Image: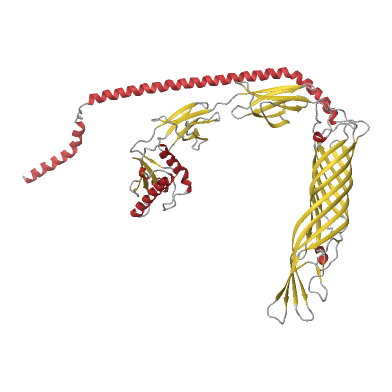
Amino acid sequence: MKNIFRNILIASIVLSFTCAPTVVYAMPEPVPAGQTEKQKAAAAKAKEAAKKKKQKEAEKKKKEAEKKKKAAERARVASEREAAAAKNTAQTEAREAKAKREYARYQEELEHPKTEVVSLFNLGLRLGYAAMMDKMAQNDVQNKLKGGVGAGLDLTYGLEYGHLRFETGLDLRFLNSTSTYGFTAVRNDLTYGAKYNYLFDNLSEMRNMFQVGVPVMIGAQFNRYYFLVGAKVHYSVLGTYSHKGLYDITVEDPALVDPYGMGIHAVNGQTNTPIKFSQPDLSIAAEIGIDLDEWLQKQPDKKKKTKVKPGERLPFGREHVHYRAALFAEYGVLNTNGTKAAQPVEFTADQVSVQKTNTLLAWNGDTKLNNLFVGAKFIIQFEVPGKKARPVPPPPSYAIYSVVDATTNQPINAFIETKSAEGDKIAMRERQIGANGIRQRHPLGAYTVDAKAEGYYNAMQSFDIAEVGSTEYVTIMMRPRPVFRLRVTNKETGLAVPATVRIIKSGETEPAYTLATDSANGAARQMLAEGPQYRLVIEQMGYDKLEQNITYVGDSLNLQLAPIKKGEVFIIKNLHFATNKTRILPTSEEALQDLYMYLARNPQLRIKIIGHTDNVGKDAANQKLSDGRANAVRDDLIERGIAADRIEAEGRGESQPIDTNDTEEGRQNNRRVEIEIL
C-alpha cells in the first residue's frame, strides 16, 4: 500500500513539472482595464507620425527641386558664358592674325638689329666688404677675422653681340682688413735666471692693400638682366699693416716661490709699416646685375613720358649713355703672402717691454693669405654702335584694366594677372587693382587676364592688342560668391548666444570651418567651398547639443539653442588636471572661461560642481581627490567674479561611473567634472 501511494505521489510531481508550462502558455493573457483607450491613442500617434513623415518627404522633394533648379540656372549661365567666349574668340581671330604679323615684324627688328657689334666703354664704382683671410700654421695662435671695407674703380672696354657680352680693361681696388690674435711669448733673463712670460690676448692687426689688375669677363644679357664670370689678375703696388693692443707680463724668479706680475702694457706696435705681398694675385670673379635704362635713361617722348622697354636701348645720337647696377664677388685663389719668416715680437737686451712687433703673416713664413671682395657696383656705359644704328621701337600699346561687380556694375578691389593667349608667358605679374583701374603696356598679341577677389568667383577674360600705339579697355565682370550666414539665439529668451559653431564635411570628423557668433546679435558668416556636403555642430556650455545639415552654401539659418533646465547635468569638456592632483592645467582655460561666461550671462542660475574619479586607488583617496577638484573649479569661478553663494561643490569619488573601468579610455571618461543646474 505504501508503495502504491509513493508511486502515485511521484507520478503527480512529474506531471506537474511537465504540464505546467503548457498550461501557462495556453492561458489567455488577461485584458487590462483601459486597453481600448490606449489603442486609440497609439493609432492617433501613428497617424500623426505618418503625417509628419509625409510633410518631411514633401519638404525634401521641394528642396531637391529647388536644388535642381539652381543647378540648371548655373548650367545655363555657364553655357551662355561659353557661347559668349566662343563668339568673342571668333571675332578676334582676324585681328589676332594681323596683330601677330605686325608684332613679328617689329620683334624681328628689335631682336636682330642691323648693327651686329656694339662697343661700350665702362666706368664702374665698387664698394663692399673686404677680407684678407690668413691661415695660420701655428696651433698655439688664436686668430679671428673681422674684415674691413673695400673699394674699387673699373675702366673697361666691352663688346655686345646679340645676347653675348665680353669685358676687359683696367681694374683698381683697395682692400682693408682687420684680424685679432692671441698668443704667448717667453723670454729668459740670462743674468738672473728669471723667466718672462708675455700674454697677448687681443692683438689687432689691420692691413691695407692697393692693387692694379686686368679683368677678363664673359657672360650674357636677357632683357634687362645680365651676368659676367671670369678671372682678374692683380698686382699689389702698396701694402701696409698696423698694430694695437695690450699684453700682460708675468715673471718666474727662481729666488721666489710664486711668480709675480709686472702689469699690463700697451703694444709698441707698427703703424702703416710696409708689408710685402706675393705677385700676382689671381681672383675668380662673378657679377650679376640689371640695366637701369628704363628708369634713368632719357626717354624718347618727353611729352608723354614714354619709357623704353626692359633691356631696350635707343640708337646712338639720341641715347648713348647707359646705366647699370650689379652685385659682385671676387675670391683670390693664390697665396698672396710674401713676407719673410720672423718672430711676432722683438726685445732688446736691457728692456723688459716689447720694443717692436712684426706682422703676424711673418710667423715662420708659412702663413697663407687669400683675398675676398664682395659688394655692390654702379656702372656708367658709353655706347659706340656700328655703322648702322638700331631701329627706333614702335610706339607702345596699352591695356587699361578695371574690375566690376557683375550684379551692381560697381568697381571692386581685386588681384589680376595677365598671360599670353597660349598661357606660357606672363605678360603682367599679379597686381592689385582698385576703383581707378590700372594701365599696363603690352606688345602686340593676344592675352588672357585672370582676376580673383575675396567674396567672388575667379574670372578670366581674353583680349588682344592688334594695333601699334592703341589702347585696349579690359573690363572684368566678377560674380559674387554665396555667403553662409547664421544667427544663434536662446530658445526661451530669444537673446543672442555667443557660441562656437563647427562646420564639418560629410564623412569627416574634424571641422572644416570654426565660427564664433558675436555677443550682440549671435551672428556669424563664412564663405564655404562649394561641392562638399556640410553639417554644423554646436556644443555650447549650458545648452543642449545641436546638429543640423547645411543644404546650400548660401543658406541663412536662424538656430535656437535649448538651455539646460533645473535638475539637468552636463559634463565640462576639455577640463584637465595634473595627474592625481587638484591643480588645474593651463589647457583648461577655454573651458573655464566658457563656464564663467555662461554664469555671467545667466545671473539667476545656481549650480553644483560635482567631481568624479575612476576606481584606481583607494576609495578614501578618490573621494578626497574628487572633492578637491570640484572645489578647485569653484575657487576659479569665484576668482573670476562669480558670487560664492551661487556655486556648490561636491565630490562623489568613484561611486558613479559612466563607463567601464577596465580600459584606459573608460577610466578617462569616468574622470570628469559635471555641472548640475540647481
Q: Quadrant of residue 294?
A: top right
Query: 498 or 535, which is in the foreground?
Result: 498
> Horizontal and vertical percent for residue 172?
87, 50
Query: 665 or 453, which is in the foreground?
Result: 453
Q: Is residue 54 left or right of residue 333?
A: left
What's the residue at 80%, 70% (across, down)?
A: 354
Q: Is residue 546 left or right of residue 26?
A: right
Q: Is residue 452 left or right of residue 514?
A: right
What's the residue at 36%, 22% (across, down)?
A: 50
**Residue 223 in view in this figure:** no
Q: Is residue 34 left or right of residue 662?
A: left
> Horizontal and vertical percent for residue 453?
62, 29
Q: Quadrant of residue 240?
A: bottom right
What's the residue at 39%, 21% (across, down)?
A: 54
Query: Image quadrant for the C terminus?
Result: top left
> Horizontal and vertical percent for residue 273?
85, 62
Placement of 516 over or under 632, stated as above or below = above
Q: Indicate the colouring scheme.
A: secondary structure
**Residue 84 in view in this figure:** yes
Placement of 639 over or under 529, stated as above or below = below
Placement of 113 over or under 349, stated as above or below = above
Query: 219 or 319, which is in the foreground?
Result: 319
